[in-house]
Amino acid sequence: QKEVEQDPGPLSVPEGAIVSLNCTYSNSAFQYFMWYRQYSRKGPELLMYTYSSGNKEDGRFTAQVDKSSKYISLFIRDSQPSDSATYLCAYLPGSARQLTFGSGTQLTVLP
Amino acid sequence: EPEVTQTPSHQVTQMGQEVILRCVPISNHLYFYWYRQILGQKVEFLVSFYNNEISEKSEIFDDQFSVERPDGSNFTLKIRSTKLEDSAMYFCASSLAGVVTDTQYFGPGTRLTVL
């Protein structure tokens, strides 16, 4: 079983749509959960970080973690063409700094 | 806004040659990292570096690889005797040294092509 599973897409939505991105993980050592955004020809950029089950909101973005199901989600409200990018889920164990990434979901928001 | 920079943006080398990839981390950061992304695959952790020594490394980071902080601003990844499968995008990152969850800021990457 892969340590992290993420639907690679591609996902194409109209401007203003609500986008749902998901990852599952199998490693119980993961304690911290991140979402990174990667534009073409750029490095990953941290969007959101959380460590507990539940929801965390930041503007149009909401990160949701369900530790019992080992499932995390990122919701984007009122999606904009500038949100078009690859979204990577990422995890940290509690004791180390090595990020484990999902394979990324490529999102296109059409004007 | 401070950012991590990497040079060159694209490096082409012949199999068996040595390459050095360079990074300038954010100036007040103390933890440095290298990750790589083979085309179409995940971003993978290679190594982290703190206080002039390797802090963590993955199974990928074998004797072929080495890292160095040659001066107060640069952080380098050396790949000896490159192989075709070393072709990938290599990302440098840096973070503060407070807690394990300090944000890792990534550079734009160096695309390495081994022929």
Image: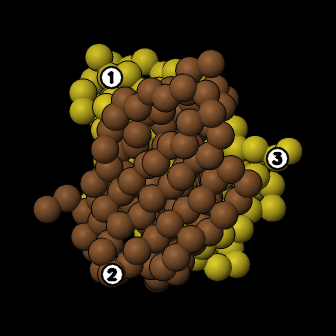
Chain colours: A brown, B yellow
Figure check: B30 above or below B4: below
- State the image coordinates of residue B69 (x, y, percent, origin top left): 63, 55
Q: Residue at x 30, y 75 (%)?
A: A69
Which of label 1 and label 3 is nearer to you?
3
Dot 3 falls on which chain? B
Q: Residue at x 37, y 30 (%)?
A: A10
Which mark is drawn over residue B114?
Answer: 1
Q: Which is nearer the eye, A53 or B65?
A: A53
Label 2 neighbour load within 10 Å: few <14, some 14-19, many 20+: few
Image position, residue B85 (x, y; %): 24, 33
Q: Looking at the picture, how far across and down is residue B66, in whole percent?
A: 43, 52
Amino acid at circle 1: Val
Q: Which residue is mark 3?
A: B2
In the rendered image, which residue does mark 2 sit on? A68
Number of the front mark, 2 or 3: 2
Position of the C terminus of chain B, as image quadrant, is top left
Asked whether residue B90 appears in the rendered view, the answer is yes
